[in-house]
Amino acid sequence: MVGPFWCQFLQADIQEAPAEKPTETLRESAKMGDASAQCALAKRLLSGKGRSSQAQRLMTDTEAHLERYFAEHQFDFIDADHAPDPNQEKKNITEKFNKEKEKFKKLKDSIEEKETVEAMELLNLAASQKNIDALLCLSDLYHTGKRVPQDLKRAAEFDLKAAELGSSRAMGNLGWDYGKGEGVTKDINEALKWLEKGYEKGNSFSCYWLALREC
């Protein structure tokens, strides 16, 4: 079961970074191997703010078409009452509405899938350069199953890599992983070890769980 603390961290991690550089500037830096740019661009893609102008225009045009379609057919259900078979007519109208909505959903899903693939490639490139931000983002994604299939083992592996690089949040995450047996074999002693390490570095989550244990 996913711990509630992951939600607050995920929201913070999958969002556009502050002091924004233009997306194309980030993209150029990412191509040059800049791990920070790779991570920042990945987050922007996952937030939907790094969308290409072509994809955004396609989304906008399709959404506008959907709104026009609904506006033009908003009284169809009322008119259906005068049809020879009102129930069948309403069923047909509903099916047409659903088909139009499904077109938009498929387009949106297709664009987001491409963005997710690119974002994951960027995050893995940054993580291979020991970028802690990328490691934490990958951990959060795999732990929650947001945009990628949930994989608690991989989440714990990224936590460990980030913790070994000195990330206090990753240490707190590992404390949770071992304490709950998520992605690793449950081991209270190992959990306490990582929580204490996180506490020593000022991690609030580690402090909270260690305080609860003392109660």
Image: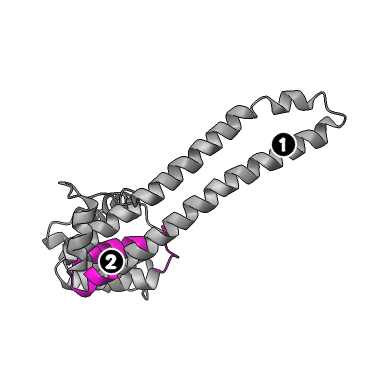
Q: How is the image coloured?
A: one colour
- The amino acid at mark 2 is Leu
Instruction: Identify the residue shown where x is 34% and y is 66%.
Output: 120
Which of the marked residues, 1 or 2, is nearer the chain's N terminus?
A: 1
Where is 79 relative to 91, above or below?
above
Kindly identify which numbered label has been placed on residue 19. Answer: none
Q: Is residue 128 visible?
A: yes
Residue 122 location in percent, x, y? 28, 66
Where is 209 relative to 63, above or below?
below
Q: Main secondary structure of the magenta part?
A: helix
Label 2, secondary structure: give it. helix
Instruction: Identify the residue shown where x is 20% and y is 50%.
Output: 22
Where is 151 relative to 20, above or below?
below
- Foreground: 143 or 49? 49
Kindly identify which numbered label has been placed on residue 122. Answer: 2
Residue 192 location in percent, x, y? 24, 67
Residue 100 in the figure: left or right of residue 43: right
Quarter placement of the N terminus: bottom left
Instruction: Identify the residue shown where x is 88% and y is 29%.
Output: 84
Q: Which residues are magenta?
A: 124-151
In space, the residues marked 1 and 2 are separated at their CA atoms by 44 Å
Residue 39 location in percent, x, y? 23, 61
Q: Is residue 133 visible?
A: no
Residue 121 location in percent, x, y? 32, 69
- Packing grade of label 2 (10 A; few <14, some 14-19, many >=20) is many
Where is 191 relative to 1, above or below?
below
Residue tagged 1: 93
Label 1, secondary structure: give it. helix
Residue 145 lies in the magenta stretch? yes
